[in-house]
Image (spheres, helix red, strand yellow):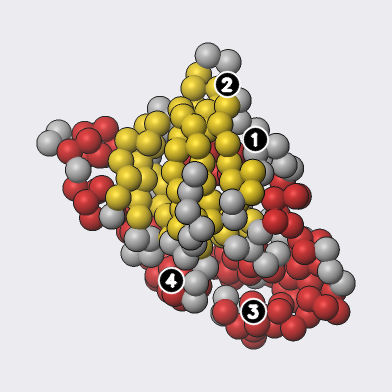
Amino acid sequence: MADAGTLLSLEGVTKRFGSLVVADAVTLDLPRGQALGIIGPNGAGKSTLLNLIAGNLMPDQGLIRLNGRDITGTSLTQRCRMGMGRAFQIPQTFSRLTVFETLLVAASQGRGISESEAAGDCVSILERTGLLDRANQVSGSLNLLQRKRLELARALATGPDLLLLDEIAGGLTEAECASLVGTIRSLHAGGTTIVWIEHVLHALNSVVERLIVLDFGRVIQDGAPDAVMASREVQEIYLGIEA
Ligand SMILES: Nc1ncnc2c1ncn2[C@@H]1O[C@H](COP(=O)(O)OP(=O)(O)OP(=O)(O)O)[C@@H](O)[C@H]1O
């Protein structure tokens, strides 16, 4: 059983698609406040694992706990209300709403409160995500970096204990990526617990203090990013480099 400092715990989480095992007895404890990165080759099971954590998919075996509570059989919406927020690679916003309206909808639906109750928090989230000067702009008119920021803000508006980031750095220029990473780093420094799957490794590794590597649905490495990236197993299996 995980200790009281554990926010999320997975115990033997297994998922099969037919005969293909895409999550193979995944067990991990995520301490509150930690930023965890998940990497692995294409098809390793990263999205599947995030979907299992978020509630888009149900495991065939195993247990998932949030704040010590068994959430294994709960829905996506229930998990959102219990403290999970997810930001997607492709922003999930309504293009005709303004940035502020988008956050109000996310906050009121995600937390089950009125838009007027949510308004103050939404202003603070706009500040933290660098979008305050875009508050009244229609979200469909934002550029890609601003839409990624809105995607982060939308996930934060649900008031999550745990922020799930799904390849959020994809498609950005180096400068845009650095700007977004700065925002994610400051969110983490403010105490936000993060699970982040990402192909842009330098972005991921500049934020997370722990990295796990998946291969064929199994956790093959778990540790500090430098040590994990330097490991022979990762060099050989993930990067395809002869050690
Ligand atoms: N709904 C599904 N039905 C059947 N097979 C699936 C389904 N979803 C994913 N898979 C398979 O499960 C395996 C893991 O897929 P997943 O998308 O989790 O990998 P990934 O590590 O996120 O890959 P990528 O880096 O390419 O996004 C792949 O072989 C994929 O084809």
Amino acid carrying label 1: it is Leu
Residues under labels 2 and 4: Cα distance? 35 Å
Residue at 64% in and 77% down: 125
**Labels 2 and 3: the sequence-earlier one:** 2
Q: Label 2 is placed on what type of residue?
A: Phe
> Is ligand 1 less than 8 Å from the beta carbon at label 2?
yes
Density class for disc 3 (Cα within 10 Å; few <14, some 14-19, many ≥20) is many
Say which residue label 1 marks. 57
* Residue picked out by circle 3: 126
Q: Earlier in the sequence, mark 4 or mark 1?
A: 1
Task: State how far apart marks 4 and 1 are (Cα).
Answer: 29 Å
Q: Residue at x 47, y 65 (%)?
A: 33
Does the Cβ of the disc 1 residue fall within 8 Å of ligand 1? yes
- N-terminal of the two: label 2 or label 4? 2
* Front in this rendered view, residue 17 or 189: 189
First-in-chain label (2 vs 1): 2
